[in-house]
Amino acid sequence: MLHLGLGSFHRAHQAVYLQRLIDAGDTRWSLSGANIRPDMADVVAALQAQGGRYTLETVSPAGEYRYEQIEAIREVLPYEPSLAAVVARGAAPSTRIVSFTVTEAGYYLDTKGKLDLTFGDLAADIERARLGEAGGDGVTIYGAVCAILRARKAAQAGPVTLLNCDNLRHNGDRFRAGLLEFIERAGDTELLAWAQSNTACPNAMVDRITPRPPPELRARVKAATGRDDAAAITGESFIQWVIEDNFVAGRPDWGRVGVELVDSVQPYEEAKIRILNATHSCIAWAGTLIGLSFIHEGTHHAAIRKMAFDYVTDDVIPCLSPSPIDLAAYRDVVLDRFGNPAIRDTNQRVAADGFSKIPGFIAPTVRERLAAGQPIDSVAMLPALFLAFLQRWHRGALPYAYQDQGMDEAAAHAICDATDPVLALCSDAGLWGAIAGDARLVEAVRGASARVASFMNAGATK
């Protein structure tokens, strides 16, 4: 398997499942890892120096620490702009799966699931692909995979599965549509036909809270294991992976080590995105607004916990019922996980990318509740929190740098500068799609914004 995106999540999740399989005696599969952009240079260099090995620290909600060495990544490809080594590995007949971890915004999709060509990186990448080039500044996941498939076709290396490992809803289907549109726009009709016949893109749901490694982790790992590990990572003890069993060139025997291989990932995906991901953002935005730094602090704050609990109970569970999952129990497990003080997940990390999270995580519940003629008072708290958070960003008053790949900064400032910011936010079609400007949405978010203001005032006096 070739994995694109050597960040902490991949190394705490997919690589761990493969390590479990290797530990069980099945050594038929290994991982090659690479980044397609020049980030994380220190981590990549450390992994190369350590032969791909690193230490994973996990912490349970009860405070139990565990350390294990992960050796499933057998090859670390250094970044260089042409992506030549990445393309060669992806085109090798021995590579049967190309997987990747991408943020929601990294798919450059508009509200209709089409490529959003207003993004300069995407337009430039299509032009490079049209000229038969790969890599370069700002390469997208489509550009990298297109180059791999082009080389694979030329080498007659056979079919390959393209596997998403991220939080995009219907990620395999949406990536496949974006990839085929990308190839079509690049004008390569032969590659388009080959990709349609020789690739599969299973939908998948992944879950494990994996914060950025704190500065003290290296010393903690050395004290516990004796290893001086410059690429150590930390995460919670909980782990889950659900994949639609749709592979065209074989796959590891993941079911043997706890991966759920299913016909449809949708109920698991919806529960995770709406309950875990949206609640995570709620807690991060709310905690930031009253001066908290970590997710666990907000989870144990009575008013914030009530916001998160009520959002799931009042609005999400009715939308997702019936479900094969015990949604109320899942809600409680999620809050228990978020409350783990040892994880020390930051509000800064979780609060990022709000302009992708509103349409991806929150708007579907709003739409379904409104379509059913039901109130949206509890879910409206989330966009109200984000608006208050955005206004802090607008004023330069956030305690940290805010990162949002899906944000048009001029449009975001315009929302905050509007005479009626609530109306401006609720009228943004990129956030809300067909319900943008709906009077019921505006009214609910206006009422929620008043409650957020009261919450912030109360928090500021403590």
Image (tube, grey):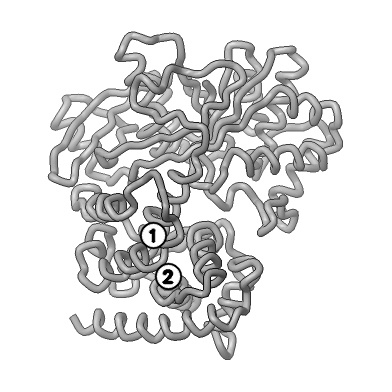
Q: Secondary structure at mark 2?
A: loop
| Residue 434 sits above or below residue 324 on the image | below
Marks 1/2: CA–CA distance: 11 Å
Q: Residue furthest front?
A: 322
Res 224 label:
none
Residue picked out by circle 2: 379
Residue picked out by circle 1: 317
Amino acid type of disc 2? Val
Residue at x 19%, y 37% (from the top left corner): 219
| Residue 382 sits above or below residue 54 on the image | below
Task: Assess disc 2: are there few (<14), some (14-19) or many (≥20) residues with their C-alpha within 10 Å of its C-alpha.
Answer: many
Quarter residue 454 falls in: bottom left
| Residue 241 sits above or below residue 353 on the image | above
Residue at x 46%, y 14% (from the top left corner): 29
Residue 289 percent across, percent down from the top left: 34, 74
Q: Quadrant of the C terminus?
A: bottom left
Residue 229 percent across, percent down from the top left: 28, 29
Task: Assess disc 1: are there few (<14), some (14-19) or many (≥20) residues with their C-alpha within 10 Å of its C-alpha.
Answer: many
- Can residue 35 be seen at all in this image of the molecule? no
Nearer to me, 56 or 328: 328
Residue at x 63%, y 14% (from the top left corner): 92
Is disc 1 in contact with disc 2, using a CB cutoff of under 8 Å? no
Upstream in sequence: badge 1 or badge 2: 1
Amino acid type of disc 1? Ile
| Residue 22 sits above or below residue 37 on the image | above
Quarter residue 355 falls in: bottom right
Residue 262 percent across, percent down from the top left: 47, 31
Q: Secondary structure at mark 1?
A: helix
Q: Residue furthest bottom?
A: 419
Classify residue 119 as left or right of residue 439: right
Nearer to me, 415 or 196: 196
Residue 335 percent across, percent down from the top left: 26, 56
